[in-house]
Amino acid sequence: MEEVQIIEETAVKKNTVITEMQNNDHEQIVFCQDKASGLKAIIAIHNTTLGPALGGTRMWNYSTEAEALNDVLRLSRGMTFKASISGLNLGGGKAVIIGDSYTQKSEALFRRFGKFVNGLGGKYITAEDVGISPKDMEYVNMETHHVSGLPESLGGSGDPSPVTAYGVFMGMKAAAKKQYGSDSLEGKKILVQGVGHVGETLVKHLTKEGAKVMVSDINLSRLEQVAKKYSAQNVENSDVIFDLDMDIYAPCALGATLNDDTIDRLKCSLIAGAANNQLLDESKHGEMLKQKGILYAPDFLINAGGLINVYREVEGISEKRAIELTEGIYDTTLRTFQTADEQNTTPHMAALHVAKSRIESIAQLKTRS
Ligand code: NAD
């Protein structure tokens, strides 16, 4: 009896994986494990219509394998649409390594992971993400050339964060143009949540523009350091940030900060930030913001600068061209708002529509001789 139950449970779990893939149309998932090095990883390839699936590898201490799978499926899908709406010839992919990035890293683990990436023959190109350092990627690179975003000293395009921040700044200015009639951010009260690699550079652009910047971070020493450097207002208590009087909220820490609880409390008129997957539920919470009159600049559109920078390595385009493409986020954001108005939908849904349409039209092109 007990045995039957175990088989049934396993079958259910097995079905869940394929069903999850079908739900959002993922092409392929690769589960990787190696007892000797302790590697446990999942590589998800969402869509390769436009080109090889590019997306970083995240190392995180997930509490369950299901949580890791969910994360990699969600993130890889986002990469597909980010590349598409940015006009890049890249597909969407992502990888997660299950483990503690402080205690479980080793050369063998990353080289073993590199072998798995190499086995995909270039269908998936990896890069750094949360929990991964340039040194880790150097080990991956020893086993595969399908690595991007390496340090400049190793022939790569270097840290993508400054370009990401510049793109977010461009997207925010476009959103200000739509919401306030001018793209100047001078005098605007802007809260930057998370002043890490991207957040700090965004603060630099905003203070240069004359905005009244407030900063929040759970890392208090970093918070103090950034606030002092740019004379920004330091908001130490991260619980109160959604109740603050502000014009613009810029999420640059984690995803899902736009949800039932926070949208009710937010008093801003515009949201533009770097974090991935800011809307907990992209349909429901996008609509809630629209109803409240808060203009939301779609995350995967305005945070694409880093991906554009990494694209230099894949397509061999110049640094100058990558900056031009990143500046193009301004016009794409304005066009997206216009499409949203025309289709009476939210900016997020309009951006998804544009991204999906490009993939569909290129897929049709590829079937013709
Ligand atoms: P980072 O790790 O350098 O910085 C994140 C900062 O957020 C850290 O200082 C951390 O202490 C802080 N933080 C975490 N939880 C917080 C909370 N609850 N409240 C306030 N602060 C909190 O990361 P990053 O590279 O700056 O990226 C920021 C975000 O942008 C991430 O969501 C990332 O996925 C996304 N993103 C980054 C890039 C890039 O080029 N780095 C590109 C696209 C998207």
Image (tube, rainbow, N blue to C red):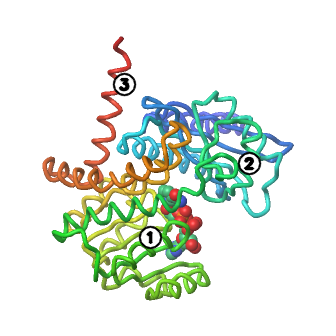
SS for dot 2: helix
On residue 138, the disc is 2
Q: Residue at x 29, y 59 (%)?
A: 286
Task: Specify which label sits upstream in the sequence, 1 or 2.
Answer: 2
In the picture, the quarter occupied by the C terminus is top left
Which kind of residue does numbered mark 3 sit on? Ala
Q: Residue furthest top?
A: 369
Which residue is nearer to you in this view: 110 or 142? 142
Which kind of residue does numbered mark 1 sit on? Leu
How crowded pointer 1 is (Cα within 10 Å; few <14, some 14-19, many 20+) is rated as many
Q: According to the image, label 1 marks what residue?
A: 202
Residue 86 falls in image quadrant: top left
| Cα–Cα span, label 1 and label 2 | 28 Å
Contact flag, marks 3 and 2 (Cβ < 8 Å): no
On residue 363, the disc is 3
Q: In the rendered view, does 360 fall on the left or right side of 228?
A: left
SS for dot 1: helix
Task: Specify which label sits upstream in the sequence, 1 or 3.
Answer: 1
Q: In the rendered view, does 61 fall on the left or right side of 223?
A: right
Report if the beta carbon of the residue with label 3 is closer than 8 angstroms to ligand 1.
Answer: no
Which kind of residue does numbered mark 2 sit on? Glu
Figure label count: 3
In the picture, the quarter occupied by the N terminus is top right
Nearer to us: label 3 or label 2? 2
Q: Residue at x 41, y 81 (%)?
A: 241
SS for dot 3: helix
